[in-house]
Image (spheres, rainbow, N blue to C red):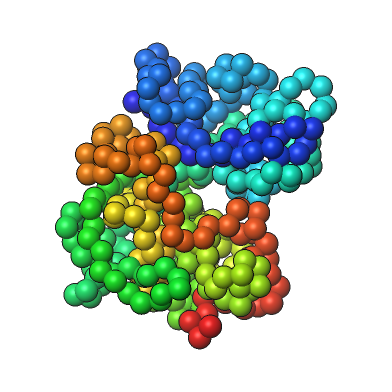
Amino acid sequence: MPTFFQTYQTEVDDGVVVSSTLITIALYEPGETIDPNDGATIRITDDNTDGLVSRAEFAAATGGGGLGLNGGADGEDAVLWDGSTGSSNTGFLYSATQYNPGDNVDELIDALPSNFPPVALDGLSIPCFTAGTLIDTPSGPRAIETLAEGSLVLARSPAPCSGNETRILRKIFRRRIDSAQLASNPKLRPVRIMAGALGNGLPKRDLIVSRQHRILVRSPVVERMFDRKEVLVAAIRLTALPGIFVDESIQDVEYFHLVFDQHEVIFAEGAQSESFYTGPQALHALTKEAREEILTLFPDLENSARPSNWFIPAGRLQNKLLERHVKNGTPVLNDMY
């Protein structure tokens, strides 16, 4: 069974972005039958079974040479480049960052190493909480592993409202990652947000989430940059702040993701963070069995665009936001604001 990853496919003409579209990449094992109806835009065979994408594997899938960088412009993104011959910087860029038409990405493309080190795509996976996380419910905080289908969970109302509402948990998925998997693929390691690191005394206890799990950030800096008071920012980008880091000490981890009728902001260890985003492309980041379960519950999802009610800045803008917070020495969560 292939593993699915989300990424943005960015069309570039002479170094300038033409368009950027969210797509799905499927990573197949050697000898595995490729399913043309798996929903993926690109299907790559992991010939050496290392869980990474090599230059040869990427070239075989795209028909082009391609260059990649394990790090990328934002320091954490896996970046793939399928370009035309010559130095015109025309082709397709694949990364977790969504670029806007007119953006110049010459510098990024030129920085891609010619030896193309193998790239781990797990940085593009769906957001997850970890076992032991306390989730707020109408009857008080509950450990995430005690929740089940039909459980009631507290959620934030999107702006301009700011109250709390009750939501029904439709589905909960879980996956354990053992020490061998963490050792072979470090990007599976979670981010630890220490108690109080976000500001305003939050989270109340250490909050441990997957790298791409997004946390609500609210501050005057947010409003100056985005003309709104709050945005969602990936945990891996929050590691620019004191007290937030990739936890190298964890020997194994169990990941959970919570599915509601729509993309929600819920309370984990008191901090506000996202649920699984049930957009149509996000579904392809699940296993086939999990995707079938979700579509049984929400049959309209596959063919309908379900936008998030929460603003999610592009990766480079998230980085700029964190840079300003670090420079000013201000917390990213200001409940007095």
Name the outermost residue toward the bottom. 336
44 sits left or right of 326 in the view: left
- The reply, left or right, for residue 268 in relation to residue 173 is right
Q: 47 above or below 170?
A: above
Viewer-nearest residue: 11 or 127: 11
Which of the 4 image quadrants contains residue 61?
top right
Give the x, y percent position of residue 265.
Answer: 38, 64
Q: Does residue 21 appear to the left or right of 271 in the view shown?
A: right
In which quadrant will I find the N terminus? top left
**Which residue is at a point 52% across and 80% down the rendered structure image?**
334
In this orientation, which residue lies closer to the viewer: 4 or 305? 305
Using the image, determine if residue 49 lies above or below residue 19: above
- Count of picture labels: 0
Residue 300 left/right relative to 198: left
Residue at 23%, 53% in the rendered image = 170
- On the image, which quarter does residue 266 sit in? bottom left
Q: Is residue 211 or residue 5 the one in the foreground?
A: 5
Instruction: Give coordinates of residue 141: x percent, y percent.
Output: 25, 72
User: Which residue is pictured at 56% across the width and 38% down the height?
Assistant: 21
- Residue 333 can be seen in this image: yes
**Depicted 315 relative to depicted 142: above or below:** above
The answer to whether residue 68 is seen in the rendering is no
**Residue plotted at (66% across, 47% down):** 100
Q: Position of residue 172 (x, y in %)?
A: 25, 51
